[in-house]
Image (tube, coloured by chain):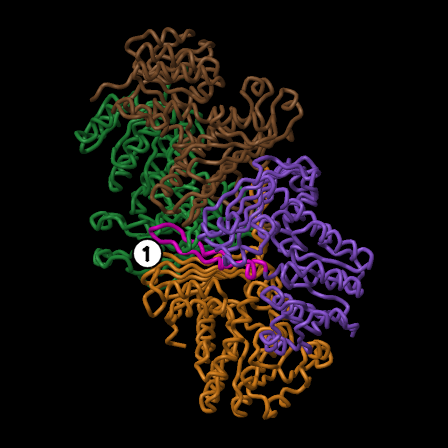
Chain colours: A purple, B green, C brown, D orange
Amino acid sequence: MPEKLNIGLIGAGRIGRVHGENIRFHVPGAEIVAVADLYSDKVKDWAYNLGIKHVFDDPQKIIEDERIKAVLICSSTDTHAPLIIQAARAGKHVFCEKPIDFDLNKIREALNEVEKAGVKLQIGFQRRFDPGFKKAYNLIGQGKIGDIRVIKITSRDPAPPPIEYIKVSGGLFLDMTIHDFDMARYLSRSEVIEVHAVGGVMVDKAIGEAGDIDTAIVTLKFACGAIGVIDNCRQSAYGYDQRVEILGSKGCAMVGNPPLTPTVLGTEEGILADKLQNFFIERYQQAYIEEIKAFVNCVLKDQQPPVTGNDGLQPVLIGLAAQRSLAEGRTVPLKYL
Amino acid sequence: MPEKLNIGLIGAGRIGRVHGENIRFHVPGAEIVAVADLYSDKVKDWAYNLGIKHVFDDPQKIIEDERIKAVLICSSTDTHAPLIIQAARAGKHVFCEKPIDFDLNKIREALNEVEKAGVKLQIGFQRRFDPGFKKAYNLIGQGKIGDIRVIKITSRDPAPPPIEYIKVSGGLFLDMTIHDFDMARYLSRSEVIEVHAVGGVMVDKAIGEAGDIDTAIVTLKFACGAIGVIDNCRQSAYGYDQRVEILGSKGCAMVGNPPLTPTVLGTEEGILADKLQNFFIERYQQAYIEEIKAFVNCVLKDQQPPVTGNDGLQPVLIGLAAQRSLAEGRTVPLKYL
Amino acid sequence: MPEKLNIGLIGAGRIGRVHGENIRFHVPGAEIVAVADLYSDKVKDWAYNLGIKHVFDDPQKIIEDERIKAVLICSSTDTHAPLIIQAARAGKHVFCEKPIDFDLNKIREALNEVEKAGVKLQIGFQRRFDPGFKKAYNLIGQGKIGDIRVIKITSRDPAPPPIEYIKVSGGLFLDMTIHDFDMARYLSRSEVIEVHAVGGVMVDKAIGEAGDIDTAIVTLKFACGAIGVIDNCRQSAYGYDQRVEILGSKGCAMVGNPPLTPTVLGTEEGILADKLQNFFIERYQQAYIEEIKAFVNCVLKDQQPPVTGNDGLQPVLIGLAAQRSLAEGRTVPLKYL
Amino acid sequence: MPEKLNIGLIGAGRIGRVHGENIRFHVPGAEIVAVADLYSDKVKDWAYNLGIKHVFDDPQKIIEDERIKAVLICSSTDTHAPLIIQAARAGKHVFCEKPIDFDLNKIREALNEVEKAGVKLQIGFQRRFDPGFKKAYNLIGQGKIGDIRVIKITSRDPAPPPIEYIKVSGGLFLDMTIHDFDMARYLSRSEVIEVHAVGGVMVDKAIGEAGDIDTAIVTLKFACGAIGVIDNCRQSAYGYDQRVEILGSKGCAMVGNPPLTPTVLGTEEGILADKLQNFFIERYQQAYIEEIKAFVNCVLKDQQPPVTGNDGLQPVLIGLAAQRSLAEGRTVPLKYL
């Protein structure tokens, strides 16, 4: 039996636990050997049940542990860049949740250190691993829709996060739309060169008072000549809505929302289909598994990560351009950022 | 401009009027020149608006009119066979609503007279002309599903007819299922050789008291080796339900229900699609047009009618077998009828 | 029987004939008594078959005919404004195809004359009468989706028109998107206050050489606070694609594309649903009937037309703003036009 | 932390492994402590990876182990009844794959022993735990469709099993339809009182030579007055097709097939939706998890199993009646069996 990849998990909040459990139950080639979390007390039972031997409150314990070959950074966004740098310097491969940072300089510094160290860095854009979106990506790659003309992405959360979260989220474009920017790059296999954004506060005034918006439409131009549009809302009464559509010269690939069940009820009011998946943890359950499998795989086989450091940088650039477009009411080319 | 086919309409109830209007508005090559109806007073305004010149209360006026080359028999079922015979003897082509009769001898006598006279006879199984069912028929003909294995037909009315209608309807199998028997023959391009029926009174006790049932499942064996099943109900809370499904060795053709509109409403209860079409007049609007076009066409071009006299006879045979199966609780082969 | 509304039809090209036939077959309260067309020779047979008594090559014959109470203007766009003015001065009610004109001054002059004359003017935005879009409009009116936040409209033609047509079309925004601008106003029950457009030539270089684009995304801000987006393409391999989606605080109304038939084919390649309707004549068949019924009705009952002169003006304003936005690469507020 | 339920797994073929892995990864309250399989060599690696400590080739080792409180019987059908009896006598709770046996006497003997021993017995009808079917069951329980009138079940395998399997399978009705008989009882909350079956050999002559059929339609009467129909085929070109439909007095619940992904491709051929799930292991992935959770739960909480011994007996009775109906060409009431 081959040796397992020893992984350290930094941050065992909601998403950190998803990765921890997925590695335990779906990735035979890897093992979480230690977890570090500010609230290590709250993490202990969870870790014990998963068979994770060490629970720390200081991530340095993981960085310094020579048996650990890779880290999963799932702590708060402000810690991402410093931890990437420390882990890279310690020769550890890194899986880091999005976004790397809101500050381009910090991102670039982190990417530099990763490059210097020659370690792998994969960014947590899990939607690329969703079977539906991946199938659309593959259909495009197989030439089924011809040349891409228009990319449309809809992303609506079931309900807004707490205001406290909104305040440190980096704003709608860097917190929520960032996934759609990544999806746009992924599906187009091209770079965004120009951005225009409109938006407003329609869901909750408190979001506006926190300096953010909750509803937006972002128009994109791609280097390949295609154009695109993303629409976002922090609230969707009918559930978590995640769709894409790619119009090409020969056809159109469309990804819809899988319902909770394929059960419908016909009555005199019409034909009622089931609700959508609750939220990202449920909707992207399979994607999270595939994502972390891919990370372990790229480390074990010494391959390029499927979502690179540059893939972490570009959506931040687009998000900053969208912020500027919204603020200044004009189109913003990315080359000036 | 070529001469128009002069048609006489016998019976201007609901379905007679549909045919009359369709000829007026959709069949440039034909004209209703006279209508006969027991209640000619009630028919006058309608006829006037359509530009029909003559309104009689006696169908003999139409039979005897030498300028009339074809008749549409849309009067009550008990008049079908005698009128077919009279029209045939007068050398007129005949379109007759289903069923020809409930009595096999009367049907055979009528078909004999038609054959002797060498006139066309088309029976009103309009569903064959529905674009959806026709497409399924064509897919089968093109070999897209390979050899047919299983045919499934669902036919549910939105609400039962009045009890007075039930009493003279010939019973569920000869009134309602008869369309499905025809659909089974049409799609299979084969003959039914054995029938088994179960059924009951679930919608309205009064239907049972009238000696009929309102819900049934009929199993069929076809000469080609395929098997089939029809399920019927006189009431469907969610609307008029008309589906077929043909499983073959290479695929499966399925015809669903077109909704009233393609508009859906997503709310926290789920995704609500629109209701189904109201009933057969709306659901088969296009089919009725195509049906009567086809009749006029086969007369004008001296072609075989697309639904022949034998196509009118066979479903009655199947329906009588289903009645016997239900009464005797056993499988009934058609050859013994 | 009440007197029929005598109508004169000006222009018997494709759309003029649709209206003529619909009045003949679906609007008992009106009659086309004369048609004027530059190519009256080509129109004669069609007119004869419909029972239209007079065929002219000069529309003045219709304007001057006192028995004619209303005109349908279906001639080329450059004739719309002058004919509206002449008809209004002659006291005739007017149904005019879109757009009224590409020139705001000419539109305003025509609307002034209509107002002075006190005649009805209805503009041919037929999509408002489509059962699916109307149902979405009604769901919104019933409060089913709460306050509107985002309106999305997709409109893709199956194939681009001939280059000769493109050259006189007024450009994508005034020829094609104009319907979507109207739909946006209709569904939002609000006015567009700001426009941003991106677009390009992706379908056919010749369209670019003619000074037009063939693919575009237009972002809208509404007076009510909502935002919206329209995506257009002159070519769609999978057929005529006409969808809308309105996200509100309590739900989302979505209008999809009705397939040609509800027949699907399941094979080892997947489940293949039928193609979409061919193009606007087929897709909006019912809408064209309802539209012209509504016009006749508003004249006969002396009511406000359901699509007013201002409804004809506003989309042209939005289209001009979109043209400027595209040319200047910036957001264009409508108040400056 | 509460003690875990120690389970012994008998038979580690395909389905045994599914249960083993589900307990390992999804049922924290239980642990497979030993596995017995005739081919213990082939099982070792799998067991080691799951952390199962003991691997035997003799199931008696599990029956005799006092630390083991429950067994999962996943060995061949002929061993089910004897192993149930032995396990029951040893005071162990039993989860047994379907069918218990093909022989009614053996089933009854096994159920007697279970009753005498006072242990739990749950039969492996996993479809009851599928979220879609369960939702339909719940909708019925909530009165959403009113009184049940018609139950329709479609079950088609993607491809027939090897002939060697067919020969020991008990035949179509006891191997494949048995799941549908269970579903019919589950959804109707009633008992089947009469059966009629037609069928034939349409997929592979070798199946006929083995004395079996591969395609069938089975009609059912229920004690509650409803009627039902099941259609089966051993081959389905478009994939594993598992649907149910329950028509009631107030509505209709329908369970469709979840596609592999919600991704569709629109081209000039139509709109192509994704394939269906491959086969039962994929289609019922969630159901298998819920099923085994329910078993562990009923043991730990000393509750009635959700699928009882009688639930294992009844579908065999129905299957035998279907066999007789097919052989004798008549309707078979269950009370005479």
Instruction: Say whether residue B147 is visible.
Output: no
Quarter assignment of residue B96:
top left
> Does residue C107 show up magenta in the picture?
no
From this view, report whether residue B145 is shown above or below residue D232. above
Residue D177: horizontal and vertical position, in percent?
50, 67
Quarter assignment of residue B72:
top left
From this view, report whether residue C319 is shown above or below residue D218. above
Residue D194: horizontal and vertical position, in percent?
38, 69
Measuring 62% from the left and 55% from the top, which residue is drawn there?
A130
Q: Which residue is mark 1?
A: B323
- Asked whether, in this view, residue C298 is left or right of residue C258, the answer is left
* Quadrant (top left/top right/bottom left/bottom right) for the N terminus of chain D: bottom right
- Helix or strand or loop: what does disc 1 sit on? helix
Taking depth in this image into account, of A318 and C1 the one nearest to the observer is A318
Residue A200: horizontal and vertical position, in percent?
49, 43
Instruction: Write down the region rendered in magenta.
Output: A260-284
Q: Residues within 10 Å of mark 1 (few under 14, many from 20)?
A: many
From this view, report whether residue B237 is shown above or below residue D4. above
Quarter assignment of residue C209:
top right
- Asked whether, in this view, residue B320 is left or right of residue D204, the answer is left
Q: Chain of mark 1?
A: B
Taking depth in this image into account, of D211 and A53 the one nearest to the observer is A53
From this view, report whether residue D81 is shown above or below residue C314. below
> Does residue A274 show up magenta in the picture?
yes
